[in-house]
Image: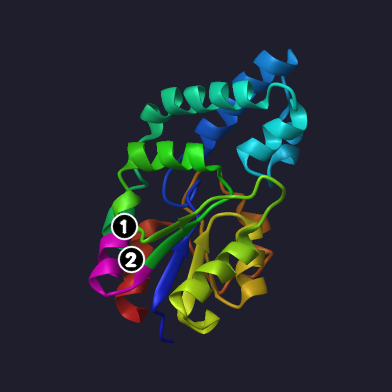
Amino acid sequence: MKLRGFIFDLDGTLINSLPVVRSSLHSTLLKFSGRVYDDQELSSLFGPSEEGIFKKLYPDTWRESLQFYLDEYNRIHSQYADPFPGIVEALTLLKERKIKLALVSGKGAGSMEISLKHSGLKQFFEMIITGSEYRASKPEHIKQVLNLWQYSPEEVAYVGDIAYDVKAAKETGVLSISALWAETVQVKKVLAMNPAFAFYNVASFIEWIKNVV
């Protein structure tokens, strides 16, 4: 196995930001819809970026609702600023081994910038691609990274924390690596997709990098 590039998801993979996403969405939906969305309703909104979500829900006031969301997201994020323990070490190790690093996330550009500011992780990535306002779009964005790097799929890994991340990796032919270290991860759903590798903690991921990459 000769890996030359790693593409990472952000939320739940590098930082514990999913609680920030859900809390900010709850506050925004309550303000602009006047009611509390249950967890199933909230989950059904995911796929498009925040811009897409708010354009669909509030076509006349989507800019106002998006700004409210981003303000909430920034306010809450300070409590969840640090990357998962070991992530900086893992990224540093990959950089030392001359591995190219990219971010491909379903987040919108605004919340991505806030997360990178709070976490301090922007320095590690030469390419950052955020989500589409129309749909979940990770496969096409992974392909975009491959094209820009001019690497074959077999030379690249995608690291994410949800079942869709495994699906996107397999669809594009890159190595699927599942990050199972966040408290928010749905382990059974992820493992049911049969990722090539799965790690329950960052320390074991680092050991794998040392031995394989």
- What residue is shown at x 68% (from left), y 31% (from top)? 54
Magenta-highlighted residues: 91-100
Q: Amino acid at mark 2?
A: Ile
Determine if residue 150 is in view: yes
Which quadrant of the rendered structure holds the C terminus?
bottom left
- What residue is shown at x 66% (from left), y 14% (from top)? 31
Query: Which numbered disc, 1 or 2, marks the residue closer to the eye?
Result: 1
For mark 2, what is the residue?
206
The relative height of residue 112 versus residue 27 in the rendered view (above or below) is: below
State how many labels appear. Answer: 2
**Residue 124 tag number:** 1
The relative height of residue 165 versus residue 134 in the rendered view (above or below) is: below
Sequence-first tag of 1 and 2: 1
Q: Residues within 10 Å of mark 2 (few under 14, many from 20)?
A: many
The foreground one among 105 and 35 is 105
Residue 92: % across, % down: 26, 62
Extreme residue toward the left, this view: 96
- What residue is shown at x 47% (from left), y 72% (from top)? 148
User: Is the stretch drawn in magenta largely helix, strand or loop?
Assistant: helix
